[in-house]
């Protein structure tokens, strides 16, 4: 990584994000998104490995763990929706000749078809100002 950013390596901790509410703007958006998604995947694997020892947890710890997984899942869902809205806004699916549902289904194999349709509906609705409150509500939900 030497040579990038004047030879300096930017390290962002969870505490930095919690204090600022966002990632530092020093990096370009594409890099912030890529780094954040890699980190989320790494943490997800770590959580999965730790959860294999769930037999050692008490009820409060199991409850807290499930709440934590729900919060992480919701955050990733909001990120997916933001990206899908951008795809719909740019019309990226049309360059390949696909409907938005088909385009998203190819790129989101973890979603079942009803979930892909819901994602596409919200992404398409985001293009109309009249639906701005709906989208804001979905994106602010915790």
Image (cartoon, grey):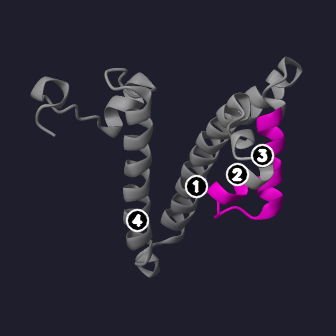
In primary-sequence order, the first of circles 4 and 2 is 4
> Is 111 in the magenta?
yes
Q: Which secondary structure type mostly characterizes the magenta part of the structure?
A: helix
Q: Which tag is nearer the camera, tag 1 or tag 3?
A: 3
| 10 Å crowding of disc 1: few (<14), some (14-19), many (20+) | few
Residue 78 pos. (x, y %): 64, 41
Residue 101 pos. (x, y %): 79, 51
| Closer to us: 51 or 109 | 109
Dot 4 and dot 2 residues touching (CB under 8 Å): no
The count of marks equals 4
| 10 Å crowding of disc 4: few (<14), some (14-19), many (20+) | few
Label number found at residue 100: 3
Pointer 1: what residue? 67
Residue 82 falls in image quadrant? top right
Decide if residue 140 is in sight here.
no
What residue is at 29 percent from the left and 34 percent from the top? 12
Pointer 2: what residue? 104
Q: Is residue 12 above or below residue 6?
A: below
Part of the protein shown in magenta: 104-124
Residue 80 pos. (x, y %): 62, 44
Label number found at residue 45: 4
Q: Secondary structure at mark 1?
A: helix
Dot 2 and dot 3 residues touching (CB under 8 Å): yes
Q: Which residue in the rendered view is the most extreme toward the top?
A: 129
Q: CA distance from mark 4 to mark 2?
A: 24 Å
């Amino acid at each position: 990584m030497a040579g990038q950013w004047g030879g300096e390596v930017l390290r962002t901790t969870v505490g930095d994000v919690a204090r600022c509410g966002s990632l530092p703007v020093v990096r370009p958006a594409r890099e912030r998104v890529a780094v954040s998604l890699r980190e989320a995947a790494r943490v997800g694997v770590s959580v999965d490995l730790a959860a294999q020892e769930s037999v050692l947890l008490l009820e409060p710890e199991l409850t807290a763990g499930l709440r934590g997984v729900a919060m992480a899942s919701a955050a990733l869902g909001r990120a997916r929706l933001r990206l899908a809205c951008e795809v719909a806004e740019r019309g990226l699916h049309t360059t390949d000749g696909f409907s938005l549902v088909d385009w998203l289904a190819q790129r989101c194999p973890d979603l079942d078809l009803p979930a892909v349709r819901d994602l596409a509906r919200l992404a398409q609705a985001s293009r109309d100002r009249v639906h701005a409150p709906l989208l804001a509500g979905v994106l602010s939900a915790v």
